Image (cartoon, rainbow, N blue to C red):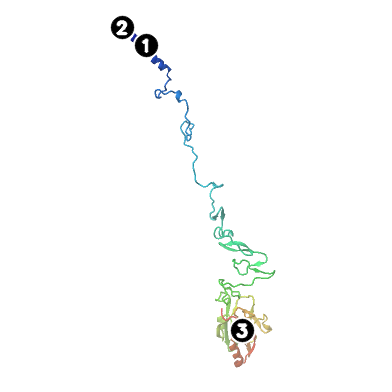
Amino acid sequence: MSVRACLAALALALPACAGGEAATESSSATVSPGTAPGTSDAADTTTAAPDSTTDVGTTGDPATTDVAPTSTAEPVTAGSDDPPLECDPLTICGVQCVDLATDPANCGQCGVSCVIPQATAACSASACAIGKCDDGWFDCDDDPNNGCEQQLAPGQMCGLVCKPDKPELCNLFDDNCDGQCDEGALPGCRVGVHRAASPTLGHFYTVDAAEAMSGDFVPEFLNFYYLYAAPGAGLVPFYRCLKGDGRRFYTTSGTCENAATPEGALGHIATDPQCGAVPLFRLYGSGDHFYTTSEAERDNAVAMFGYQYEAVAGYVWAAP
């Protein structure tokens, strides 16, 4: 081919090449800015499934992941949101406010329930106690452990019961089970009787030591024996009686046996030998009444001094 023919063929080929490229460009989809060349928007029209853990907020910003938490805690019981109990000055026992000093269901500590035989239980000073005895039953020994232990008929009363730890009282009873009663010089319980003698007025007995030393009286024994100051079961007044000649005698007769003027009670004497009491012997001779707790002295007064034994005036105590 000649040179002219080649140039003519080349000129015809160039526009064809340009038009094909344009057609190619026009048939291609528009690429969005930032999209990789050759990637079609149509190819990206399928919306990806949203992340199951992402909750889009109202502002369009991703919200905090809302995944249900996993927990090993115990289930919350009803009422757990209630405020805690405020019991001060009481004590919390379970879901209650209690007074441990007085609550028989929580006596002294939570859960300690008092049970008293034959009685309604009570709690006193944090210790179980007897509230009220059942009908016909009585607490005679003041011991809550055995409750109301005595069943008595109508009108019957409890007898006194001794216990080793009980304090001794002035009641003519052995409260502490030691074989004695009212021992220990209990204040105001027994009073000492002093014995004096006068060459002109004979024997004289008084609870006043100064009186036993008055005039021409000479004390023979201070606290010769003891009487009870106050009345009690089995006790009677022991009267001091003034005779017309100035001498005295002593008797349980409130009228001084219609033989003298009563001067009042010396104390209270027992009518039987209770609570360790000993007999007080009464003698009379030559206008003088003589009293002693000694059998030997009684017999000697009869044998040596001409006294006549009359009777036991009552029962007295050798110690306070």
| Residue bearing the label numbered 1 | 15
Nearer to us in this view, 228 or 155: 155
Q: Quadrant of the C terminus?
A: bottom right
Name the mark nearer the viewer: 1 or 2. 2
| Residue bearing the label numbered 2 | 4
Distance between mark 1 and mark 2 Cα atoms: 18 Å
Q: Earlier in the sequence, mark 3 or mark 2?
A: 2
Q: Earlier in the sequence, mark 1 or mark 2?
A: 2
Residue drawn at point x = 34 percent, y = 9 percent: 9
| Residue bearing the label numbered 3 | 280
| Residue 247 figure quarter | bottom right
Answer whether labels 1 and 3 touch (C-beta < 8 Å): no
| Residue 240 figure quarter | bottom right
The image position of residue 58, as x and y in percent, is 49, 31
Distance between mark 3 and mark 2 Cα atoms: 185 Å
- Kindly tell me whether residue 283 is visible in this rendering: yes
The image position of residue 144, as x and y in percent, is 59, 66
Q: Say which element carries label 3.
A: strand
Numbered label tally: 3
Give amino acid for label 1. Pro
Give amino acid for label 3. Leu
The image position of residue 76, as x and y in percent, is 54, 46
Q: Quadrant of the N terminus?
A: top left
Kindly give the residue lying farthest to the left in the view shown: 3
Which class describes the residues within 10 Å of circle 2: few (<14), some (14-19), or many (20+)? few
